[in-house]
Image: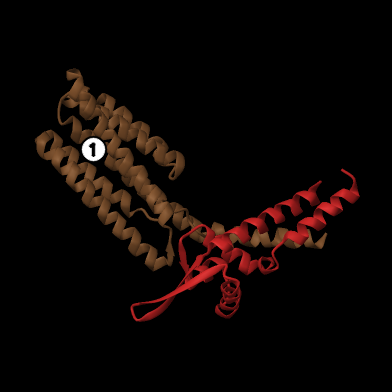
Chain colours: A brown, B red
Amino acid sequence: MTDVQQVKDDLQFVRQAVDRRPPVGRDHALRYYWWAAYVLIGYFLLDINPVWGSWFLMIAGLVVMAVIGMHAKRRGQIIGEIDRVQNRRNMLHWAGGIFAAVFFPNLLAGVVPALRGPVCGQIEVLMIGMVYFMWGVHVDKTFLWLGPIMMLGGALVGFVPHYPWTWLGALIAVGLVVAGILVQRKLARDLAVQPQ
Amino acid sequence: MSRAVEQVGAARSLDQLDPLLQHRTRLGGMVLLSGADAMTFSRLRELLRETDGNLGAQLRKLEGAQYITVRKEFADRKPVSWYSITPVGRRALKAHLAAMESLVKAAKV
């Protein structure tokens, strides 16, 4: 049936065009490097001075988010594609997830004294690890292992005698850099084998 | 299912295909635009691997049917055309893809 064959050929053509378009959220690695630097500095500050560290993580988090947002917008202009729905979805995942991860443990700590201090920070890290893991489920598979590593690190941070947060920050930063490198390699590979 | 029923099903699906979307470039452009808020002419050309002339002609047909809209702006003094799918276009694409699916299913039975 030639009509059916024509339909199949057309669908194949459309599929190839769609395959040339990398999924939004996995289209550049720069954001991972920004977050790696943020975690490395912020967690180091938590060991030096927990108050400074907390302020840094809060303010710099907003700044990095704004920088990444501007970069994504600029990148959209350069490649010629705007996807506000997906960008909003990504922002809600990270901003909503991290807000919940910080807000609820602190809320609970207000009621349960045992959750105050470093324990509260550990719960926050556990929950942020879950946010990472969910990013792995929906967008970037690298985070499927980075999320659990972060959760494990959050659980074990109490057992490290010296600079526990710095170690944890370094571990997460390395994970983010590796994730960024893997994204870059995948993009380069996809570009090399793009269907003609 | 008898052969006659299959043929009736396939014929009905064929009737439901949108003639405007039976061209692969127009169909490809609509599918790509349905997955983003807006895309430039260059981006569509890059993804569809089409020539300027052919892509421009196909996009004008889609624009004429009000399936897509175009917004023109300047970036670094160069004109840039941003294309977006309209609600009419989205509905037409959905109906066309459903008809294509039924056609392929009818042919498989």
Left or right placement of residue B42 versus residue A64 in this view: right
Which quadrant is the C terminus of chain A positioned in? bottom right
Residue A35: image location, x then y, percent: 27, 47
Residue drawn 21% across the image and 51% down it: A63
The residue under the point 10% across, 36% down is A51
Looking at the rendered structure, the kind of residue marked 1 is Gly
Taking B97 as reference, is B24 above or below it? below
Q: Looking at the image, can residue B103 be seen?
A: yes
Task: Give the percent coordinates (x, y) of residue A119.
Answer: 21, 24
Q: Pointer 1 indicates a residue of which chain?
A: A
The answer to whether B85 appears left or right of B98 in the picture is left
Q: Position of residue B105 (x, y in %)?
A: 76, 49
Residue A14 image-quadrant placement: bottom right
Residue B37, position as x, y percentages in the image: 46, 61
Q: Please tell me whether residue B52 is drawn above or below residue B46 in the rendered image.
A: below
Residue A46 vertical placement versus A67 (above, below) = above
Residue A115 seen by the camera: no
Q: In which quadrant is the N terminus of chain A drawn? A: bottom right
Provide the residue designation for mark 1. A169
- Taking the spot 53% from the left edge, 64% from the top edge, the residue there is B86
What SS does tag 1 mark?
helix
Is residue A85 shown above or below B40? above
